[in-house]
Image: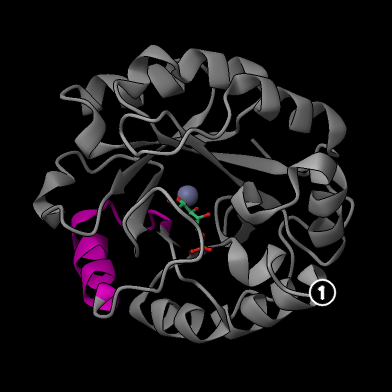
Amino acid sequence: MSRLTGVAPSILSADFARLASQVEEVMAAGARLIHCDVMDGHFVPPITFGPMVVGALREALPPEAVLDVHLMIERPERHVADFARAGADNITIHVEATPHVHHAVNAVREAGATAGIALNPGTAVEALGIADADLVLCMTVNPGWGGQPFIAGSEERIRRLIERAAPGTPVEVDGGIDARTAGSCAAAGATTFVAGSAIFGAADPAEAYRAIAEAAGCGQPYPPEGQPAPN
Ligand code: DX5
Ligand code: ZN
């Protein structure tokens, strides 16, 4: 288990007017990894937020919060230092967003964060050309919006990505994750489960978090209550 495993509530579906308190609610239920979806209006049509919101969350949240920043932006290598400076712990870039994936991964690490590589559902798994990412993100919907249905058959892509990634690399799934799909993705080998609408769209986000964590087989928080995440 590492700080990049577990259920990662996605703030995309949270109430932005009370972002910190919504995150604190799921952290009280055991969440440590907080997924932040950055969209630029180019790589995907919507625009969300940039480093300022990541920095505001960093300041508002306790140190055990691990900020997992998912960049759905073109040429992410031009922005990774700003997100790292703002307090991102992990920064994931898309292989489709730059011809310079290897350089972008290096830029993330030089900026002091761990580096994830994301693949869209239509991208061949062979596009995961370098095996030394700190995390591989298997999109289980097309990026851009919360609340879409899980793409059937994604479990097979998870298995194939695990074969390509370096042994032990956390594999994150993102899109349409709820208690049912978290279970089938966990069975395929996924270690990290992003859930937006299934958590923040629920009447009780803390209870929804616990149900997904239970289904994914990662009910225990990491690191243990009250302890900071190791670097
Ligand atoms: C979609 C984002 C997701 C989104 C998932 O492009 O990358 O992180 O928040 O939302 P749900 O869990 O509602 O599918
Ligand atoms: Zn995401």
Q: How is the image coloured?
A: one colour
Which residue is at a point 81% across and 70% down the rendered structure image? 206
Q: Under tag 1, what secondary structure?
A: loop
Which residue is at a point 44% across and 78% down the rendered structure image? 186
- Residue bounds of the magenta highlight: 154-171
**Residue 162 placed where, x, y %?**
27, 63
Foreground of the two, 93 or 224: 93
State whether residue 135 is above or below residue 158.
Answer: above
Pointer 1: what residue?
204
Disc 1: CA contacts within 10 A as few (<14), some (14-19) or many (>=20): few
State whether residue 6 is above or below residue 76.
Answer: below
**Residue 27 placed where, x, y %?**
81, 57
Foreground of the two, 160 or 94: 94
Q: Which image quadrant: the N terminus?
A: bottom right
Residue 127 is inside the magenta segment: no
Say which amino acid is labelled 1. Asp
Drawn side of residue 189 relative to residue 54, left or right? left
Residue 164 appears in which quarter of the rendering?
bottom left
Drawn side of residue 37 relative to residue 116, left or right? right
Magenta residues, dominant SS class: helix
Q: How many marks?
A: 1
Residue 187 appears in which quarter of the rendering?
bottom left
State yes or no: Cβ of the residue under disc 1 lies below 8 Å from any atom of ligand 1.
Answer: no
**Residue 25 placed where, x, y %?**
86, 59
Which residue is at a point 15% across and 52% down the rendered structure image? 123
Foreground of the two, 40 or 30: 40
